[in-house]
Amino acid sequence: MKKLGFSIILFAILAGIPLYAQEIQGTQSTFYYVDMPIERIYSHMRGFAILYRGQDWELEWAYLPIEWLSPSGEAEERQAPKIDLVNLAPGNVWPHLTIFYKEGVFDHVRLYVRPERGHSSWGFIERDIDLDDVFQEVLDADDLRLTFQLPGQ
């Protein structure tokens, strides 16, 4: 009798799991993300110039304006920052860049970096190199266009 009762309870639990899983699947996120390893992060007074491996492992550049680090807009319409700067803990984790898209449109970036500026992933751009136009173009477009293929494109 105990075996029959145990079997019924076990069957009820196992039968309920797929129903619960189907309920969870109906709540899909509108976010999609792409994570890419960074070759080098260059600090510039206008933001960060990121050297990364793009499509076909070619070296590509991405520019993240400094204005994206802090909230923008008037107090009533303030938007969240477009760059989340995350310091990596000591260890063997290499810096990487995660780009988030909401409903297929660029939303924000998480930049995982080593806090030690002497780390080999950090580089510095000479002051006489003018990147103002490049950073301004990204800021005006309010978009981050990187060379990789999104699914379905």
Image (cartoon, rainbow, N blue to C red):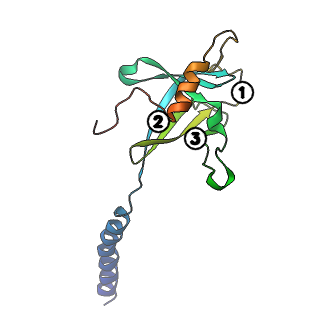
Label 1: how many Cα within 10 Å (few below 14, some 14–19, many 20+): few
Which amino acid type corresponds to the residue marked 2 in the rendered image?
Asp
Foreground residue among 7 and 68:
68
Label 2: how many Cα within 10 Å (few below 14, some 14–19, many 20+): few
Residue matched to label 3: 82
Indicate the position of residue 67 as horizontal and vertical percent values.
Answer: 64, 34
Give the side of residue 107 with respect to residue 89, left or right.
left
Foreground residue among 66 and 72:
72
Residue matched to label 2: 35
Q: Describe the element under mark 2 as helix, strand or loop.
A: strand
Sequence-wise, which precedes: disc 3 or disc 1? 3
Instruction: Kindly identify the residue that appears in the image at 27 percent across and 39 percent down.
Output: 152
Give the side of residue 131 with respect to residue 13, left or right.
right
Sequence-wise, which precedes: disc 3 or disc 2? 2
- 103 relative to 46, above or below: below
Indicate the position of residue 7 as horizontal and vertical percent values.
Answer: 30, 81
Which disc is residue 116 wearing? Answer: 1
The N terminus, quarter of image: bottom left
